[in-house]
Image (spheres, rainbow, N blue to C red):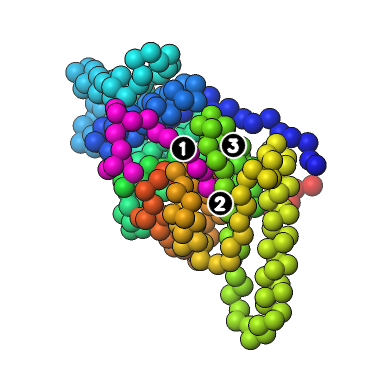
Amino acid sequence: MLPGKPITKVQHILCPSDLSDKSQKTLGFATRLSETLHAELTACHCAPANWFTSENRLPESEYAKIKSRIKEQIVQAEDPQSSLKWRSLIVENSFDPADDILAVAQETDVDLIVMKARPGILSAFRFGSIVERIVMDSPCPVLLLPSRFLAKCDPRTEPITFRRILFDYDFSSENDQLFQTANTLTRDYKAELFVLSVIAPAFRPSTEAAPVRQSRTSVQTIIRRKVNDVLEAEGRSIMNVPTSVAWGGHAETVLKHARRHEIDLICTALAPAHYYVEKFYSAYLGSLLSSVECPILVKRSPTSSRVKDFAA
């Protein structure tokens, strides 16, 4: 058995808010999440830049109004007996909110970013949206709250609850950090953890039915062993963690598994986008966002540098 790793702790959470109703709801749930995890909360608002004036400082009256709205939402959501530590930051003259939010995440050393996400592939995860760009370049996992989830829940009357967590394990480079975060949430919410590994089928057709079935069984066996090794390394008892291996149809399989087991949180890693298949990369997470009613914890693998140093 591999030596166990210490389960990491989520100590600092960042929640950007554009002050819209859904964004403020998301801030409320980030408040509840921070209380449960005993984490510090940083709320962030990016004040749009004014392109037509040379003086771009935020007026004091507007500054106070933004701070007041953020404070009001946090106070309404938090437990009266809470010892939550929080602060609010305002980024003035923001020409690029995604870039500014990522800069705040780097500078404040956060462990988790919590954001709202609109449903649909075209609206939420195409054309360089703020959510997509943050997921692509975030130094830490991002917790996305879909519109369906925000529509049926209110942080002022009910806390965010994770009873069953599904980890979509694909053996990418970001699975280690993501799995540790999932373990932290499982522990602090006393949740049940499920592990699913979806094997992508080969793109070339085959007419040899028997060899295909044999190879599929062999691959499933290998992946089950790898998943078991990861669980043991994380100090998990394999008997207490249901592990499943499925074949093809990534988004559809994850959604079907989530519905069958009444999952409250889906954890998934994204491979780095490629120029020719970037549309499919966006479509996968877009399909999840447009269908699920539970939050999605996501981390994207970094793109390998195309610059090579051949200096002696």
Q: How dense is the environment of label 3, judged by Cα within 10 Å: few (below 14), some, or many (20 and up)?
A: many
Residue at left 70%, top 65%? 219
Closer to the eye: label 1 or 3: 1
N-term mark: 1 or 2: 1
Confirm whether the magenta stretch covers residue 157.
yes
Local SS, label 3 = helix
Local SS, label 2 = strand
Looking at the picture, which amino acid does disc 1 mark?
A: Phe
Q: Please give the residue where the numbered disc 2 appears in the rendered image.
A: 168
Image location (x, y in percent) of residue 248: 55, 67
N-term mark: 3 or 2: 2
Magenta residues, start to end: 149-167
Image location (x, y in percent) of residue 210: 69, 81
Q: Please give the residue where the numbered disc 1 appears in the rendered image.
A: 162
Local SS, label 1 = loop
Does the residue at mark 1 contact the one at mark 3 (Cβ under 8 Å)? Answer: no
Q: Rounded to the nearest whole Å, what is the CA distance between mark 1 and mark 2? A: 16 Å
Q: Is residue 59 left or right of residue 157?
A: left
Quadrant of the frame with the N terminus: top right
Image location (x, y in percent) of residue 221: 72, 61
Looking at the picture, which amino acid does disc 2 mark?
A: Asp
